[in-house]
Structures are given as structure tokens and as C-alpha cells.
Image: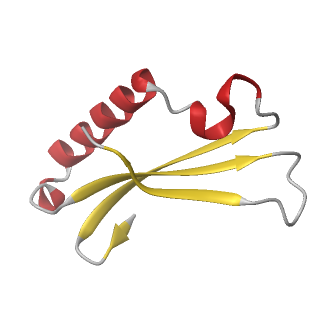
Amino acid sequence: MLEANTVVFVEVRYRLHASFGGALGSVDQRKQQRLALAATLFLQRHACWANHPCRFDVVALQGSGHAGEPLQWLENAFDC
């Protein structure tokens, strides 16, 4: 995603239940490292974006998917 001049890598997570930390908790250290690697590969293959600022966001959904259930969007959720 592009927001102004910033390349934003967005991880979308869904969990039905809050067990084991829920949707936000599922973006653990291992997952963050994998996302950072994917971002690095993307920037290497698309050099036109390599000099732009980057950030990692997480969008988390939890529950049965009924309307009105909250969506959590954490901007700049982690650094790498």
C-alpha cells in the first residue's frame, strides 16, 4: 500500500476466538521476521520504492465476521 510517500506493508490477520492471543497476538516475532524478509525482497525487486520510507501495519479482525465487530488497524505495528 502507498500512503503519501510511504510504502506500507500490511499484514491482515483473522482469528475466530481470542485463544492464544487472538488476531493481534498472532503477529509474533517469527511472523515479523518473515514479513521483514518479504518486504526486503519486494524492495530489491522493485528498486523504484527502495528509497521511500517504509512501515509495517497490522489489520486484525476477530470474531464470527458479523457486521459491527471491531476492526483493529495498528499503524507502524513493529520495527525491523
Q: Residue shown at 34%/27% (left/top)?
A: 33
Query: On the image, which quarter does residue 5 sit in?
Result: bottom left
Q: In the image, is 48 to the left or to the right of 9?
A: left
Q: Position of residue 63 (x, y in %)?
A: 83, 45
Looking at the figure, which quarter contains the C terminus? Answer: top left
Considering depth in this image, is 41 or 72 the residue closer to the camera?
72
Q: Position of residue 21 (x, y in %)?
A: 66, 29
Q: Is residue 37 above or below residue 63?
A: above
Q: Is residue 20 above or below residue 44?
A: above
Q: Residue shown at 35%/59% (left/top)?
A: 8
Query: On the image, which quarter does residue 39 sit in?
Result: top left
Q: In the image, is 31 to the left or to the right of 41?
A: right
Considering depth in this image, is 1 or 79 the residue closer to the camera?
79
Q: Is residue 79 above or below residue 1?
A: above
Q: Is residue 16 above or below residue 9?
A: above
Q: In the image, is 39 to the left or to the right of 12?
A: left
Q: Residue shown at 30%/36% (left/top)?
A: 36
Q: Residue shown at 55%/59% (left/top)?
A: 73
Q: In the image, is 37 to the left or to the right of 20?
A: left
Query: On the image, which quarter does residue 19 sit in?
Result: top right
Considering depth in this image, is 20 or 46 the residue closer to the camera?
20
Give the farthest residue toward the bottom: 4
Give the farthest residue toward the left: 51
